[in-house]
Amino acid sequence: MAVRKILVIGGSGFIGTRLVRLLGAGTDYRVMVPTRRYERAKHLLVSPVVSVVQADVHDDAALSSLVAEADVVINLVGILHSRAGSPYGPDFDRQHVQLPRRIVAACLRHGVPRYLHMSALGADEHGASMYQRSKAAGEREALASPDLEAAVFRPSVVFGEGDHFLNMFAALQRSFPVIPLGSAGARFQPVHVGDVAQAFERAITLPHIAGNIYELAGPRQYSLRELVGLAGWYAGRQRPIIALPPALGMLQAWALEHLPGKLMSRDNVASMRVDNVTQAPIAAELGITPAALEEVAPLYLSPRDPQQRYDLFRSNARR
């Protein structure tokens, strides 16, 4: 399949930025990134093959116009929080379900042959959380048409420079003397943002991907407690962690979801009732050897002072 123009919806976010930079590093593609606020995507304009278009992808006319210009559409849009609803809230419905439905319809209308869809490890129509159920519904929409070559990607929690996961726990340990932690035993298999971007980039031209679901996870599993401890250690501010019983963990989430920034919600806690891990390696056809968290996270979490960095790396090397 000859690919020239790629539309990356959600391209100005954490994963999208890494993917757009990867796609823009060569001259094989022309990459379009729509955004409602141009200023938020200006950082992508470092390559002559990348263009940023101010548009609202939730507007049917705007979405249709964008898709009409593409050979491949990639959808990275995802949110972590929504107002309540059944089986999922209206915000999850709009972003995770309605948007892929409309993208698929636009692809079929304009004869775009391939659609790559971001989901999440743990997507389950019967899942405990609205998030999991909405992600599963979005997958159904993405794979609904036999006339469109669509593939789904399910990453575990994604880490890397600028992430909102390890950086958040590092920041909390810089500010507080102790970390009370709900769902401390929940298990994750973090995957590096570069590996996720590479999976999408390689799937653009892979043959026979229709209906495939790719699970993306790193080489090792961790409990949430272990990840919080590592984030503090690499940041040079490791604090004692107090594991909360389920009732207190839910109460903590209730309190946090009412604070600015919404660090945690009760729906997030519900998601963590199921381990966010996979037993299989990343699909061989993607050709990815996943990066280890221990090799990457210290590079962006460690203290900025050179001596502190040196002491930390010596400690990690047991010297």
Image: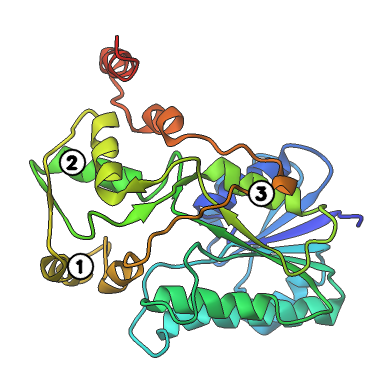
Q: Is residue 62 visible?
A: no
Q: Which residue is mark 2?
A: 173
Q: Mark 3 or 1 closer to N-term?
A: 3
Q: Mark 1 or 2 closer to N-term?
A: 2
The amino acid on which the numbered mark 1 sits, given as a three-letter code, is: Ala
Q: Which mark is residue 53?
A: none
Q: Which residue is mark 3?
A: 199
Q: Residue at x 18, y 34 (%)?
A: 238
Q: Which residue is mark 1?
A: 253
Q: Mark 3 or 2 closer to N-term?
A: 2
Q: Residue at x 64, y 42 (%)?
A: 21
Q: Secondary structure at mark 3?
A: helix
Q: Quadrant of residue 85?
A: bottom left
Cβ–Cβ under 8 Å for marks 1 and 2: no
Mark 3, other Cα within 10 Å: few <14 / some 14–19 / many ≥20: many
- The residue nearer to you, when weighing 74 against 277, is 277
Q: Residue furthest bottom?
A: 86
Q: Is residue 24 visible?
A: yes
